[in-house]
Amino acid sequence: MMKKFAYLACAAIILLGGGCAQKKSQAETTLTLALRAGTYTDVIKSCLPDFEKKHNVTCNVLALGEDELRTAISNDSANENGLYDLCMVDGSWKAEFTARNVLTNLTELDYSLDDDIIPATTTICYNNGSVYLAPYYGNVTVVLYNKLILKDAGYTADKVVSIDDILAICQDANRRHNIGFLYRGDTLNNLVVDFLPILRSFGGWVTDYNNNPTINTPEFYRAVNTYMTLIETGRAAKKDDLITAIANRSAAIAVGWPGWYTPERNSTMDYFALTGKASHGSPSYNANVYGIWTVGIPRNSTHKETAIQLLSYLMDAKLQKETVYKGGVPCRYSSLQDPAILRKFPQYEVVCKALENGIYRPEMEEWADFYAILGLELKAIFNKEISISEGLINAQRQLDAMLNQHRRKKLTKKSSN
């Protein structure tokens, strides 16, 4: 009898031990998320507890700055067993990442983009017909402004229909001893991107349809000339200082992003989208530049099955609608056109229109080199170290040379293979 009892006790211990080991094994599944620091990370973190509980998963979130995030994802692609299982990707990195096989083909994991997502925001998400990214956070350029300063200048947001109107408001702010236009000059990337909506309003762009540089053009010259007049009414500022200055009625206007700030009814700061008109009588161009943060799965993730479940969960239409109340900006009609949301956040009507008619930065592997060259020349122009013509000629020449060199390398590599 004692032997039988001992046998049963041992069996129970083994079974309990096995159960604990199995439970521990399940709990050990950890997904590491490399995300863009700020509201973008905060919104995703708010969604994770339910997913973690349902799937018995722990999500380790890394909130990284823009350059740090790009470098981390890019460098990790060389590892056989990657550190990251889900990542945020800026649209301007897509060409580089797909060319270097950094991302997982989501179509092969049976993931697809649904019709509720604003179509224009998905163009960057495909490569050779397959989905590699999903548009998560609908960042698109808007104009941040102080309501009281606009009112003093005789304007309301709906009356600002051109760049000329923005300039008039900024000059009026100067006459009242306020700062006019604030711009981001802290990095070359920020400097270029801040200028792009103005460039588009003049009908210019940085490349043609074949990704050849289009810098030394009359449209580019006029845009730079006007932008210089704008920045003469203000100064350069980092994001937080820029937001504070406009909120405190120290400054009038700046180019910003919905991810920076969610206006409230009692706030003196709000935003509107550019109409794409340089002046009242000029044509209207698409001037809303995308800064959309997409989500994807690194190719060398060791937990792809769970990662695609997380990506699908985060992209769920119902969940994304809930994120609006936490600072989220979905690229979905069901969120941005929802009557209840618009009653509380009327500015999302503006965001929806901007996302419908937005433009991504050029889809090229060399974009980082491109904006660095252009940014240096623009900085020299804005600092009045060189003339506009000289700077544009320099930029055109350098960009042509850089892109031609990259193309020759690709051809050489292709022929050798």
Image (tube, rainbow, N blue to C red):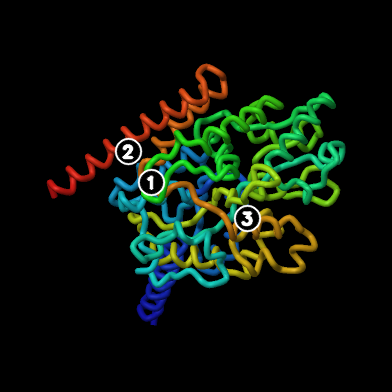
Q: Is residue 196 above or below residue 330?
A: above
Farthest residue, direction front: 281
Q: Residue at x 56, y 20 (%)?
A: 383
Image location (x, y in percent) of residue 10: 38, 72
Image location (x, y in percent) of residue 350: 69, 56
Residue 130: quadrant of the picture: bottom left
Image location (x, y in percent) of residue 390: 46, 23
Three-letter residue code for mark 1: Asn
Q: Residue at x 56, y 40 (%)?
A: 199
Q: Are marks 1 and 2 in contact (CB under 8 Å)?
A: yes
Three-letter residue code for mark 3: Ala
For the N terminus, the image quarter is: bottom left
Q: Is residue 369 above or below residue 270?
A: above
Q: Earlier in the sequence, mark 1 or mark 3?
A: 1
Q: How many C-alpha atoms fall within 10 Å of the one at disc 1: few (<14), some, or many (≥20)?
A: few
Farthest residue, direction top: 385
Q: Residue at x 62, y 64 (%)?
A: 320
Tag 2 residue? 403
Q: Secondary structure at mark 1?
A: loop
Q: Is residue 296 left or right of residue 115?
A: left
Structural distance between the alpha carbons of marks 1 and 3: 24 Å
Q: From where the camera sits, is residue 194 visible? A: yes
Q: Earlier in the sequence, mark 1 or mark 2?
A: 1
Is 200 or 297 nearer to us in this picture?
200
Q: Residue at x 35, y 58 (%)?
A: 302
Q: Secondary structure at mark 3?
A: helix
Tag 1 residue? 211
Structural distance between the alpha carbons of marks 1 and 2: 9 Å
Tag 3 residue? 354
